[in-house]
Image (cartoon, rainbow, N blue to C red):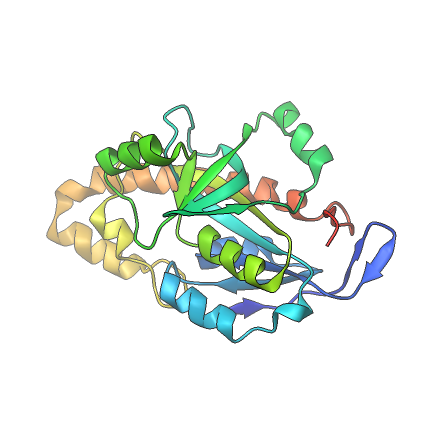
Amino acid sequence: MILAGATATVGNTIDPRPVLIVTGLVQEARIAAGPGMIVICSSSDPQQLRALLATLDSTTFRGVISFGVAGGLDPSLKSGDVVVATEVYAGDTRFLAGLALNEEMIAGAALRRRRVVRGVLAGVEQVIAATACKAALHSETGAAAVDMESHIAAAYAAEAGLPFAALRVISDPASRALPALAMSAVKPNGDIDLRKVLRGVARNPTTLRALVSTGIDFNRALRSLRGCRGFLLGGEELVTADI
């Protein structure tokens, strides 16, 4: 899924190239879409994301941003808290985040009661659902959060010589396990298959409480993510590091 954007400015210089925004879910893609952006949605499928990126000409972009929700690894983070990546870990590989977002808006986020922290993101190929697995990954990497797109977006940017940034909002905190039904209900287009969720609940009503809690966390994360949209563009300006 690709959503087209338009031209934006970089500092005082007009740069016709858009920024590539990498998301995992269609809800994230809809939030990110706008002028100066090309938005792609992986449907939370790492292989699909790699295949999609392989079709794109990296010279047409001026930067890459991973944008969406994430699983919490740091126990102090709650759903809705924002993680601006300092770097991304994927196994033994580390990618630095060298593309600055809108620092003025980030600095003022606390005034709107939104918690923003800077920290490491862990990139994985499969959903980290169990709380014990989250704790183990946090202990191993020191990462604040985990997702399945940032490491792939960072690798693409590194190979292309493009600046990279990642902004992720905590959806499921470290203390909450993701229900198996929630993990399997993502459609190929990145949307949520509500019929599948309802059928699963009908078959096993005991999953309802966990799904409701997960849904509340997810909706809180999306509200927070909408509030972070301005971090990507300050008006019509994107604040970037030198390329």
Q: Horizontal and vertical percent for residue 8?
A: 77, 59
Quarter holding residue 191: bottom left
Left or right: residue 161 versus residue 185 is right
**Residue 241 appears left or right of 142:** right
In this rendering, the answer to whether 37 lies above or below 87 is: below
Q: Which residue occupies the foreground of this view, 115 or 121?
A: 121
Residue at the spot 29% in from the left edge and 57% down from the top edge: 185
Q: Identify which residue, 101 or 31, lies in the foreground.
A: 101
**57 left or right of 120?**
right
Give the residue at the far front of this rendering.
92
In percent of width and height, residue 217 lies at: 38, 37
Identified at 80% across, 56% down, the residue is 9
From what the image shows, is residue 150 above or below residue 56? above
- Among the 4 quarters of the image, the one containing residue 171: top left
Q: Can you give x and y, in whole percent of width and height, for residue 91 in the image?
A: 36, 48
Examine the rendering and report whether any part of residue 97 can be seen. yes
Side of 180 where 235 appears, left or right: right
User: Vertical placement of 26 versus 88: above or below?
Assistant: below
Q: Residue at x 61, y 73 (%)?
A: 57
